[in-house]
Image: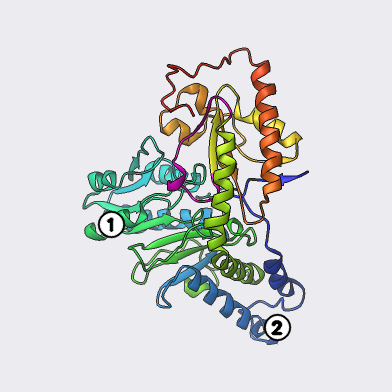
């Protein structure tokens, strides 16, 4: 049996999405910017796809949504443009991000920090969530940008973007949120709160890889990262990825249609699965489930190196992760567990399970069975593990 439970890393392309994309690879394959029939026959699909993407986040037509190659590009673009326009010119000298942003935000922040920008890394609390007060405590009249993700990719923790948006509006500081883990999991309505830039990526909600987007509120300009043929209104040059844009549009439409199922049925399956996992001795979950996206579990199995657990699960045909895929190559502790101050013997034991609308109860039942077998095997061969629930100084309450 093969079970895929790493949907926060990437998702399967919905068959309806693939069907919508296929003609733009092999029939209507013209370059949209050419002056002939092969080009113009792509235009209706591009228009329709963009309308679906705008509708998916409730973006007014006057605002901009620029298609990029991925969320990493979109995140880089925001921070580097702000650096170019605000920090390099001396107008401002500071940005604020959370300490658990995706590497595409953190690494870019460290890059511009190395070039003289002051960066505040907001701490997360014991539940893995940002306190909006920490934004108010650190924002100044020299702050050029606040960038805080909507939902964390490792824990699923939902951050208070509405409150943070209000604080940014009060200080007239642009607010960027990386919404990659929110689209398709939570209602996203950019008119319901103050946000200036918003990042998302199609392969996180059953669209194709290689297609991302950046929402830009009217009046908040950005210096282009890519110059050339002036596509996307001059914001981002490069021949349009027609099948990718068509795919993102269909995936967005499907994600909105499936949102109730995601938020109710998937949440119910996730909660029941998590309840069973927490019956295993010495297991810990950081963020309360009601403060998480409906599909994500980050659970620690004390005494078991995350990679060892993954290996056993992989042999059983089960795909999970120790945190974000970007960090899975190294044997470092889970960055979120470290940020909340988890004890060393916990920080390396986190496993992320992330469900999707394609996850079945049978798959979860099989996974639970395999997890129990892996825990028994790995703790059995451990030279250091002994179950001691009373008085163990872990910084997390044993379940
Ligand atoms: C919050 C967030 N922001 C940006 C990205 C990057 O998306 P790309 O379209 O792949 O560039 C991701 C992708 N997180 C994957 C791969 S590292 C994970 O396993 O958690 C993300 O979760």
Q: Where is residue 124 shown, x and y percent of the image?
A: 37, 39
Pointer 1 residue? 168
Q: Residue 194, located in which quarter of the rendered image?
A: bottom left
Q: Residue 305, located in which quarter of the rendered image?
A: top right
Distance CA(mark 2)–CA(mark 1): 46 Å
Residue at image point 64% right, 54% down: 11
User: Dot 2 surroundings within 10 Å: few (below 14), some, or many (20 or more)?
Assistant: some
Q: Where is residue 260 shown, x and y percent of the image?
A: 53, 62
How many numbered tags mark residues here? 2
Task: Confirm whether residue 388 shows in the render.
Answer: yes
Foreground pick, 161 / 27:
161
Q: Which mark is residue 336?
A: none
Q: Where is residue 311 shown, x and y percent of the image?
A: 70, 31
Q: Which tag is nearer the camera, tag 2 or tag 1?
A: 1
Q: Which mark is residue 38?
A: 2
57 relative position to 29: left or right: left
Q: Is residue 217 above or below residue 304?
A: below
Span of residues in magenta: 280-296
Foreground pick, 86 / 347:
347
Foreground pick, 42 / 275:
275
Q: Is residue 247 magenta?
A: no
Foreground pick, 164 / 222:
164
Q: Where is residue 377 shown, x and y percent of the image?
A: 70, 22
Q: Quadrant of the N terminus?
A: top right
Residue at image point 54% right, 27% down: 348
Element under label 2? helix
């Amino acid at each position: 049996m093969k079970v895929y439970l790493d949907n926060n890393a990437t998702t399967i392309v919905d068959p309806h999405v693939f069907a919508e994309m296929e003609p733009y690879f092999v029939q209507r394959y013209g370059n949209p910017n050419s002056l002939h029939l092969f080009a113009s026959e792509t235009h209706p699909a591009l228009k329709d796809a963009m309308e679906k993407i705008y509708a998916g986040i409730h973006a007014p037509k006057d605002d901009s949504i620029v298609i990029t190659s991925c969320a990493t590009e979109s995140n880089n673009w925001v921070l580097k443009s702000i650096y170019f326009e605000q920090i390099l010119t001396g107008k401002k000298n500071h940005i604020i991000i959370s300490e658990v942003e995706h590497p595409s935000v953190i690494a870019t922040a460290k890059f511009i920090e190395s070039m003289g920008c002051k960066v505040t890394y907001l701490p997360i609390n014991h539940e893995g969530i940002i306190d909006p007060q920490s934004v108010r405590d650190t924002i100044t009249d020299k702050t050029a940008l606040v960038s805080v993700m909507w939902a964390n990719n490792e824990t699923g923790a939902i951050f208070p973007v509405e409150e943070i948006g209000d604080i940014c509006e009060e200080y007239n500081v642009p607010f960027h949120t990386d919404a990659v883990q929110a689209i398709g999991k939570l209602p996203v309505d950019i008119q319901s709160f103050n946000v200036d830039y918003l990042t998302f990526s199609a392969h996180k909600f059953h669209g194709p890889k290689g297609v991302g987007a950046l929402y830009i509120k009217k009046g908040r300009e950005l210096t282009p990262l890519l110059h050339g043929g002036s596509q996307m209104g001059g914001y981002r040059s490069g021949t349009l990825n027609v099948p990718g844009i068509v795919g993102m549009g269909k995936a967005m439409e499907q994600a909105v249609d499936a949102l109730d199922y995601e938020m109710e049925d998937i949440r119910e399956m996730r909660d029941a699965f998590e309840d069973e996992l927490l019956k295993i001795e010495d297991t810990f979950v950081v963020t309360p489930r009601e403060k998480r996206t409906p599909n994500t579990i980050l659970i620690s199995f004390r005494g078991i190196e995350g990679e060892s657990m993954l290996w056993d699960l992989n042999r059983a045909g089960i795909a999970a992760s120790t945190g974000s895929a970007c960090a899975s190559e190294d044997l470092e502790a889970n960055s979120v567990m470290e940020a909340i101050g988890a004890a060393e013997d916990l920080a390396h034991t986190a496993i992320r399970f992330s469900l999707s609308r394609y996850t079945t109860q049978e798959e979860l039942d099989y996974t639970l069975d395999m997890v129990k077998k892996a825990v028994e095997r790995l703790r059995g061969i451990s030279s250091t593990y002994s179950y001691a629930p009373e008085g163990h100084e872990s910084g997390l309450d044993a379940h």
